[in-house]
Image (tube, helix red, strand yellow):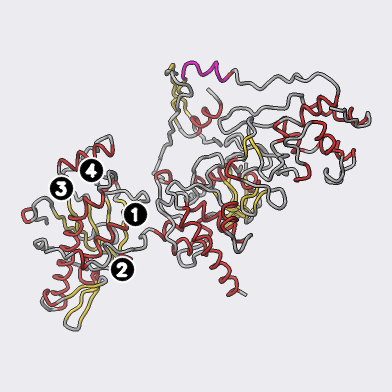
Amino acid sequence: MNNKLLYLLLTSMFVGVVLVFANIEAETNSQTPATEKSEVEGAPFDKMMAVLTHKRCVNCHPSSDYPRQGEDRHVHNFGVQRGADNHGMPALRCESCHQHENNDFSGVPGAPEWSLAPRSMAWEGLSRVEIAKSMLDPTKNGGRTLEETVHHLTEHELVLWAWEPGVDANGNPREKPPVPKDEYIEAVKAWAAAGAVIPEK
Amino acid sequence: MKISFNINGQPQTVDVDGNTPLLWVVRDVLHLKGTKFGCGKAACGACTLHVEGEAVRSCSYSVKFAEGKRVTTIEGLGTKENLHPVQQAWIEEVVPQCGYCQPGFMMATAALIEKVPNPTDEDIDNNIVNICRCATYYRMRKAIHRAAELNQSSKQIDQ
Amino acid sequence: MSNSKSVSRRKFLVRAGIGTLGVLALGTVVFRNPARRKIYELAETIVPPYSGTGTEANLWFEITKDNQVTLYSPKVEMGQGLFTGLAQIVADELDVDVTQIQVIAAATATGIIDGLSTGGSISVASLWQPLREMAATMREMVKSEAAKKMGVEASSLTTSNGIVSGGGKSMTYAEAVADVTKWKLPKTPALRSIKNYNFVGKPVKRVDLVPKVLGDPIFGMDAEMPDMLHACIVRKEHIGATLKAWMLVKQNKCQAW
């Protein structure tokens, strides 16, 4: 039985009746998060870009004014929009629902500064080379130096949320990027230290 | 854990698990039942209230985040004798049917007209995305425009 | 107290001082004909068992001390505007303004069990006749008490907006019925022509607007009872899953769910 159900049951009754349905235990046990082993072999650039092109990143780096969500990257429900400051519309802020941490009861994800990347940082639909070029272009990356870009990529809490994505509304864990966090951070730093070279493709 | 905040103008301290949704604290600890549970996953807006004047879906808002903040629920929006412009407009346009989702809509609207004093239909579409099973949307739109008018004129009187 | 002989399918109950505010309560047991019952069965799937004795009122209203009328409805307001419809029906025969009527759901604790439900689009249709008869009967009873207090003939009195007037005098319904302990139940008066009604058939603002914009109404989920326990249904997550085992767990303290 999954924890959410159990909580619901236990906490709402002084004397609770716990029902166990056959076939469920085995099913839920198999839902443990993916292994922490990298699914990506190759150069630091490859590992870094495997993360940055993952839905956990791209969903909030859209090329439109509509965030995307979910593993299938559907347009965010309810027609929510970017708004003037990338934090949503005046009375429908990102913070109307998204708080500073994941809410695993309701399945609403959260992290500090939950918001969309500015329009200039749109990644959706770009190739990994185009994304990397955009990341290094001060006219698009918010005037960041390489050092500041590395800082954003490796230390910004909203970025690192990708490895603590919580569970969805049904209690299922969200998919994490294909490279473990430490390995990704190492890859970003190694790539930057080696001159931040962007390959041909 | 002990959490203190101001609700509808009154200081309150509750002793609950910090991860309890603010909605449950408001309803079950403070017995303010006007704020409704709808979906429990921030999708329907029935639980909308204000935290520091911002519309928040309280089913997905851990009470620990409310520490030291100002919370307003439908019970604190207006009174029978002193209706909030949104409530006045809701009466004039005869919006509620079953009424269950209406407090959430009214709280969302109250936040909207503070930030966008004269909302267009597009502003309404972009900001008020709550769900009403009775489908009172048509009258709601009229009432939102009316509430904005009433709000503007009440502010002019205040000045 | 009751005079069931004079009314064919209904019994009127007249009780003084019911509740804390009521100074006059008039009620009727509405017996449903078999066809209606069939519709109920269809509408509700499960037939609501009638657990009363058959003599308790399951529809009644009261005149309160502040000259308002409280109508206890055995039908459920679920947004369809039923309470407003009932208020319109009552207002036109009782001669009160629709805003003087508060319609509330009768509590199951009052024994009003049979038909505490709504469905099949029959709520208004089924109460249309009995409510008008009750309202008209109550109006005549109020007039008759007013006539005694004012020392005039009841037939010389007129009623409007909850006030009885005649011979240069007037008093509110509440004043007319105050302190009355013995009631004489008249024959059901002739009902008025529908075309003379002021509220029925005309647009009227919902009677439940103010409480609903204040967040006051108590929905099922909002109800709190002493020592109330909460329960929820745990549904199986997979088609074909069967119940394997269950156990009782004592839980003394509520946690964040």
Q: Are marks 4 and 1 on the same chain?
A: yes
Give residue B15's position: percent from left, percent from top: 58, 43
Mark 3 or mark 4, whichever is nearer to me: 4
Q: Is residue C182 left or right of residue C61?
A: left
Identified at 65% across, 38% down, the residue is: A68
Q: Which residue is mark 4?
A: C114
Residue C182 in view in this figure: no
Q: Main secondary structure of the magenta part?
A: helix
Q: Nearer the viewer, residue C250 or C4?
A: C4
Give the magenta range: A21-28
Q: Inspect the image, locate mark 1, and give the three-letter code of the amino acid beneath it.
A: Gly
Residue B2, quarter of picture: top right
- In the rendered image of this protein, does residue B76 appear above or below residue A106? below
Which mark, by number, is residue C66?
Answer: 2
- The span from disc 3 to disc 4 (Cα, nearest Å) is 12 Å
Q: Nearer the viewer, residue C21 or C154?
A: C154
Residue A27 colored in magenta in the image: yes
Other-residue count near label 2 (Cα within 10 Å), few / some / many at <14 / 14–19 / ≥20: few
Give residue C173's position: percent from left, percent from top: 23, 70
